[in-house]
Image (cartoon, helix red, strand yellow):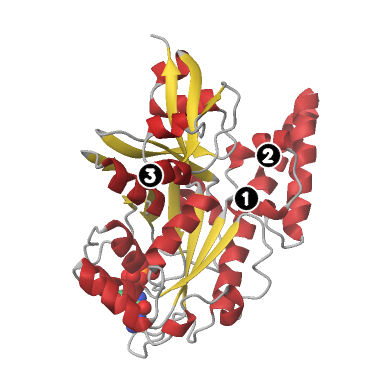
Amino acid sequence: MDIALCGLPRSGKSTLWTILTGIEVPQGSRAETRRGVVKVPDPRLDALTVLFQPKKRTPATVTYLDLAPVETGGGGRAENPVLGDLRAADALLVVLRVWDDPSDPHPEGSIDPARDLDSLETEFLLADMEVAHKRIERLNASIKKTNRDEEKKERELLTRVLSWLEEEKALREAPFREDELKSLRGFAFLTLKPLLVAANLPEERTEDLEASAGAFGLEGLEDRAQFEFVALSARIEEEISGLPPEDAQAFREDMGITEPALDRLIRASYRLLGLISFFTVGEDECRAWTIKAGTPARQAAGAIHSDLERGFIRAETVEWDKLLEVGSMAAAREKAFLRLEGKDYIVKDGEILHIRHSG
Ligand SMILES: Nc1nc2c(ncn2[C@@H]2O[C@H](COP(=O)(O)OP(=O)(O)OP(=O)(O)O)[C@@H](O)[C@H]2O)c(=O)[nH]1
Ligand SMILES: [Mg+2]
């Protein structure tokens, strides 16, 4: 699952990507796409690891892409390589510049995160309109010749897409049916992708680190679909990431930061992608596995190994906190906390699974 960092020039994308991934960005190589795999912080897995003392602890991961900036206001969106990279991602992480530095001025001349978000979203909207419009033109030509129902159906759907976009509304807010969303998938519309907005604050505004979007003039964001907001300071996180863990903790306490902003950001990304974790535990390994919310047990077993999916008999399941309470799988069985579930059981976030299988 790829999350693409995007934003106006010099908003702090590469700085944020570096502290997320721990990979240094070489100066001056800005046009290149970089990917980095990031471990998802999970206190539940930490607690299970303390209990089982396994040889190995394997967290869930997400991948972040660092891209060139989005240039707004220009033409030729269909050919813009950055927009192409964004289309290939599963979700977008917009970095908004709230920090100010007179020696490194904002390209628009002033700090205004609401304006920046608006111009980025407009850019995405126009790019999507271009895609829909082009396809409709092709379909028109083809329908004239062949008059196929399938193409007429597609044109009808895309016409609805276009009129929705013309009202300046993102497609993720539109009431499409499941089957319609499926036929739209191939177009990789930008405004259909889940959106995470990170406000990159100046270092001195630590009291705003846990503030909601409204504090930055970003009104009405809370009710949006498939949307998350996190406020952080890339600079502070950069400083913290250079400290030994004990000092980092003390530094955070001094600044009144309860949860590391990076942890909040990564967990928000994971949520936004519609992902949940189930765990497998034992002396060898405690591990978080990633599935889409709503995945049935048999398919979830396939995330571990295809053999487990094929030979699936039953899943033994228990909530992570119940397992911690009793201390072992055997005790959970004794106390009847352990349930036996069939192949269609929908796995819940935070459950421990033990798959019984044949072969
Ligand atoms: N003062 C201050 N400077 C910052 C902050 N975040 C980033 N910068 C500086 O801003 C400049 C641009 O940061 P980058 O992380 O490269 O920004 P970017 O969005 O990747 O830039 P482009 O890829 O060129 O669009 C660098 O000199 C950073 O050190 C911040 O929170 N405060
Ligand atoms: Mg950059």
- Badge 2 vs badge 1, beta-carbon distance below 8 Å: yes
Q: Report helix, strand or loop for mark 2.
A: helix
- Badge 2 vs badge 3, beta-carbon distance below 8 Å: no
* 118 shown above or below 45: below
Q: Which residue is pictured at 75% across the width and 43% down the height?
A: 176
Q: Which residue is pictured at 27% across the width and 77% down the height?
A: 250
Please report whichever mark, 3 or 1, sits nearer to the chain's N-terminal start. Answer: 3
For ligand 1, the image quadrant comes to bottom left
Q: Disc count in the image?
A: 3
Badge 1, how many Cα within 10 Å: few under 14, some, many 20+?
Answer: many
How far separated are the C-alphas under marks 2 and 1? 9 Å
Which quarter of the figure has residue 142? top right
Residue beneath disc 2: 181
Could you tell me which quadrant the N terminus lies in? top left
- Residue 37, position in %: x, y? 32, 48
Disc sitting over residue 192 in the figure: 1
Which quarter of the figure has residue 165? bottom right
- Residue 302, position in %: x, y? 45, 24
Please report whichever mark, 2 or 3, sits nearer to the chain's N-terminal start. Answer: 3
Disc sitting over residue 60 in the figure: 3
Disc sitting over residue 319 in the figure: none
The kind of residue on which mark 2 rests is Leu
Q: Seen from this angle, which residue lies furthest left?
A: 244
The kind of residue on which mark 1 rests is Leu
